[in-house]
Amino acid sequence: MLSTEDIQFYLGIFKGLSLGDLYELFNMAQVKRIPAGGIYIEQGATSKKLGFIRKGLIRAYRIKDNGDDVTLMLRWENQFIASHDTVILSQPSRFTYQALEDTTLMEMDYGRMENILDSNPKLSSYRNVILLRMLSEALERMESFVLLTPEERYLQLLTEKPNIFNRVPNKHLATLLGITPVSLSRIRKRISQTPKR
């Protein structure tokens, strides 16, 4: 059962909807706590978990055939987290989603949520908002690798989340940016030595 604070939180996300509109969603929502290092979604999982991070940080990663660990995405406070594979494609997750810090999120089963959304036109538009946001984030990441240099990707991430570099190990940040940890160190050093305008 959600607390009054949790209900207020949801009303903030789903602006313009009443308690009555959200009643069924409230009944299926739960607070989920994941300790640092804990797994939220396993690679190969088929459940359609959809979370909204209240506090903490989650990374999606995969171990390549050569044993290298590659970070696909990072999600932090006030962002949705879900496996694109399971929610959008209805396929097993190709990635593992791990909490890098103690993390608290509001969680719903997207499969069950779809039934509720289908029966309430006011809620139905929010499905598109969630899915389009996930798609937009994936496209932005792909475009950054085509249009930006590694240094520009670094600066973009720094703009989005200035404290991310204090919260995530360099090896994870480097693979997220598509570079080696040594290259990341060089970029950080070069930027720190650039005179401020």
Image (tube, grey):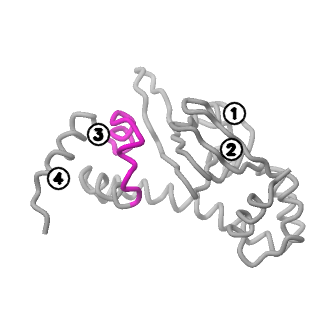
The mark lying in front, picked from 1 and 4, is: 4
- Residue sitting at x 27%, y 34%: 181
Callout 3 touching callout 1 (CB < 8 Å): no
Earlier residue among tags 2 and 4: 2
**Which amino acid, mark 3?**
Ile
> Which percent across, then down, holds residue 74?
48, 46
Label 2 to label 1, Cα distance in Å? 8 Å
Q: Quadrant of residue 27?
A: bottom right
Is 42 left or right of 161, judged from the image as shown?
A: right
Query: In the image, which residues are magenta?
Result: 160-178
Earlier residue among tags 2 and 1: 1
Callout 3 touching callout 2 (CB < 8 Å): no
Callout 2 touching callout 1 (CB < 8 Å): yes
Is 165 left or right of 188, judged from the image as shown?
A: right
Label 2 to label 4, Cα distance in Å? 39 Å
Q: Which residue is mark 4?
A: 191
Is 167 left or right of 25, judged from the image as shown?
A: left
> Which percent across, then down, holds residue 152?
26, 57
Is 197 left or right of 15, judged from the image as shown?
A: left
Q: What crowding class fits label 1: few (fewer than 14 Cα within 10 Å), some (14-19), or many (20 or more)?
A: some
Label 3 to label 2, Cα distance in Å? 28 Å
What main secondary structure does the magenta stretch of the protein show? helix
Label 1 to label 4, Cα distance in Å? 40 Å
Tag of residue 179:
3
Tag of residue 45:
1
- Residue sitting at x 79%, y 69%: 124
Tag of residue 151:
none
Earlier residue among tags 4 and 3: 3
Earlier residue among tags 1 and 4: 1
Q: Which residue is mark 2?
A: 86
Label 4 to label 3, Cα distance in Å? 16 Å
